[in-house]
Amino acid sequence: MRAIRRFTVRPVLPSALAALGDLAGNLRWSWHPETQDVFAAVDPDLWESTGHDPARLLGAVGRQRLEQLATDAGFLDQLAGARADLEHYLTGDRWYQRRLAAGVEGPKAIGYFSPEFGITAVLPQYSGGLGILAGDHLKAASDLGVPIIGVGLLYKHGYFKQSLSREGWQQETYPVLDPDGLPISALREDNGSRAVISLALPDGPEMLARVWVASVGRVPLLLLDTDVEGNPDHYRDVTDRLYGGNSEHRLRQEMLLGIGGVRAIRAFSRLTGHAAPEVFHTNEGHAGFLGLERIRELTVAEGGPKLDWDTALEVGRASTVFTTHTPVPAGIDRFPRTLVEQYFSEAGPTPGVPVDQVLALGTEDYAGGDPSVFNMAVMGFRLAQRANGVSQLHGHVSRGMFNGLWPAFDEAEVPIGSITNGVHAPTWVAREVIALAASQGADPDSDDTDGFWAAVDKVPGAEMWAVKRQLRERLVHDARRRLTRSWEKRGSARAELGWIDGALDPDVLTIGFARRAASYKRLTLMMRDPERLKSLLLHPERPIQLVIAGKAHPADDGGKKLIQDIVRLSDDPAIRHRIVFLPNYDIAMAQPLYPGCDVWLNNPLRPYEACGTSGMKAALNGGLNLSVLDGWWDEWYDGDNGWAIPTADGVEDIDHRDDLEAHALYDLIENEVAPRFYDLDHEGVPTRWIEMTRHTLKSLGPKVLATRMVRDYVRELYAPAASTAHRLNSDYAGAVELAAWKKKVRTGWAGVRVEHVESSGVSDAPEVGDVMSVRAFVALGDLAPADVEVQLVHGRSTGEDDLVDTTTALLAAAESYEGGRHRFDGDVVLDHSGSFGYTVRVVPRNDLLASTAELGVVAVP
Ligand SMILES: *Cc1c(COP(=O)(O)O)cnc(C)c1O
């Protein structure tokens, strides 16, 4: 029988246990083991059977048990302690407040928009790395006291659950999530009714959306959901699932996220008094339409300042940060231009914002661009004054990928920086590992993260090794449980599954490999030579075992085929005890997986892994990375904290390249990794392995943290953006001026020329240390010397007269002549021997620019 209507009845807790509701109502429990202990104490079996879900636990526990707990002094003590700790966490001063108190300025609030958020397995609103990163960003911001407001969508089915058919083909199911059973609450108007925002669409009535609030520690996360009464069915389905549907479906989701998201923030501020964001951060391009809503607020909205387009654009840009996440061109979010045109007509969601201007923002009007598409990343760069990639290598690749937007500049000068991703230690590090460092007096809450990880030096090797075995064993048990469930789903009877009791071994070198089955991640590289792999798995003295997991996008049959290939291999009775595929990679699986692995394997096709974070989580648990030098590993591999799989960059034949890299991988495992793991001292401890583990924790521990990442965002992007924004929009005079100045520079630039350069001071046999004086005669037309920077760029000169390893010095305005001509002077010391070259160029200068490349114009001789 099907229910015609369903709802969830919230439990009523005895008043003595009211604090349980407070603890369940804030997702901080998901990264706070002591709070989890409280829930486990309520009913250990239910805690396990609900999959560690406080809301379901409290819904399922019987009245009798609750009444018993309400008089259990020991439990009440534990509960009161956890509640007090939460209060302290939520209200005390943290890093950001201490920074403000020390006089360092920062925004009062930051809006952080993302299409997915991975916070806990019981709020399945994520598909993979992007969502997990967004979740870790919010959690770390909370730990640091950074005033972020998260904005996302609440998908009725979240992302799919993966299982396997008998043939090993991926099966997808989409369980319905009842928002009333999730750890979120409705945003309400003062009269108690649910807050609703709306969006005009050209093909029907206004689309309505509810606003939910998840409390992520100190950070509110607003989630929008269109499954509301009053919406026609095709609107109700807009938030049906993550990354499902066609372009039009995705466009509607992204309009809701960006435009609806700004409206949700306004409603949230109005109803709670929360400060309005001074900075808006769009995590990947999907939320980019938020910039259009802000332009609408500034140009045409009732009660707004009614600025002109150019001025509003400057205000919006100054206060917007855009993070790009993919170096795979096919991964960039693009829509048919005609579709965007149709949706942003006068009847669309941002009335009064001219559709031509909207279209111009997403146009690929550069060499090689496709005029028929609307590119969300391109719009992201145009609507954000500050932009970054997510590792140094990815920053470099992104500057190349988007050089077309700043064609006058060399790749190195494209204004896209980088902040390397990080992971939230309290979520991902096994409690036992934290306890090891804490046992030496280290404080996990301290700002001194170097000091915390350095404490591992004092932990005896045998103790570390014992903990690692315990974590490996936990993974083995979890994997066996998952395998049993999976084989039952695949149609096996329990009696046939006795072998699973011997699957994986807590004393065998365990290699983890879990990722989305995107083709560049090369899920099956390890299978290039199945016989070689078998011999590694079954080595008589130094065997390895592999734990593999990952989902393919539902529409990606190629990815599903890769999964099937792995599953079939791992079905082979000869090796199935040493290689397992675990279906449904998610946070719940990941949490015991990283700590249980000795080695984390990653073999993407370089440089397509923008950053990667799973290896960071492994490292924080003392796992050693065995990875292609891509993403974060390219930056932080130091020769002693793991292994680099050599890559055959530049080998065009992909098959051949895969062969070369797979064999390099086998060789490394056979000759380096396994011998070291099994090289035990008289106490049975692999001392050289433990040394690498210590070095990994000390060298990578402080770097890979999400708190390091969020601090970087605050210092390098949020605070500077807020500062520029203040100067522009306190009364908008700054923005009016900047917009006018840009216009003047753009129209006047045709008159800017480097006419003539003279140098003196060096003989015909120059030596290191000689000083060269340079005089540049420059025509500026209608512009003034203060509008420009005249740069002397010098470096080594190559055979083709290209300059490399350049340094930039500024020339100072020395004299002005008639006709808008000026002389700029300066000196340069010849600081290296060998070929030396220089040039002079002119770029626009204004304190309110984030980069001299921002306008895209430059004048050279
Ligand atoms: C960390 C994590 C990811 C992302 O890992 P990558 O290294 O970026 O591929 C994906 N899914 C889950 C469940 C994770 O925990």
Image: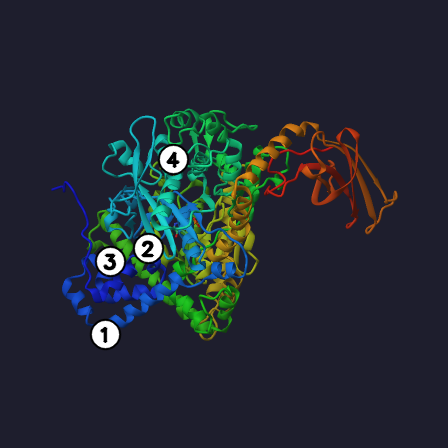
Front residue of 273 and 774? 273
Front residue of 409 and 662? 409
Say whether disc 1 or disc 3 marks the residue closer to the N-terminus: 1
For residue 164, say whether it is visible.
Answer: yes
From the top left corner, tell me how far across and down residue 472 is, in percent: 37, 63
Kind of residue at disc 1: Ala
Point out which mark residue 588 bears: 2
The residue labelled by disc 4 is 255
> What residue lies at 54% left-to-right and 43% top-to-bottom?
386
Kind of residue at disc 4: Met
Say whether disc 2 or disc 4 marks the residue closer to the N-terminus: 4
From the top left corner, tell me how far across and down residue 540 is, in percent: 41, 61
Classify mark 2 as within 8 Å of ligand 1 or not, answering yes or no: no
Say whether disc 3 or disc 4 marks the residue closer to the N-terminus: 4
| C-alpha separation, residue under disc 2 versus residue under disc 4 | 31 Å
Say whether disc 4 or disc 1 marks the residue closer to the N-terminus: 1
Q: Residues within 10 Å of mark 3 (few under 14, many from 20)?
A: few
Say whether disc 3 or disc 2 marks the residue closer to the N-terminus: 3
The residue labelled by disc 1 is 73
Kind of element beneath mark 2: helix
> What residue lies at 77% left-to-right and 50% top-to-bottom?
832
Q: In front: mark 3 or mark 2?
A: 2
Q: Residues within 10 Å of mark 4 (few under 14, many from 20)?
A: many
Q: In front: mark 2 or mark 4?
A: 4
Task: Tell me whether circle 2 and circle 4 mark residues in contact (CB < 8 Å).
Answer: no
Figure check: 334 above or below 524: above
| C-alpha separation, residue under disc 3 versus residue under disc 4 | 52 Å
Q: Residue furthest left?
A: 1
The residue labelled by disc 3 is 498
Kind of residue at disc 2: Ala
| C-alpha separation, residue under disc 4 versus residue under disc 1 | 52 Å
Point out which mark residue 159 bears: none
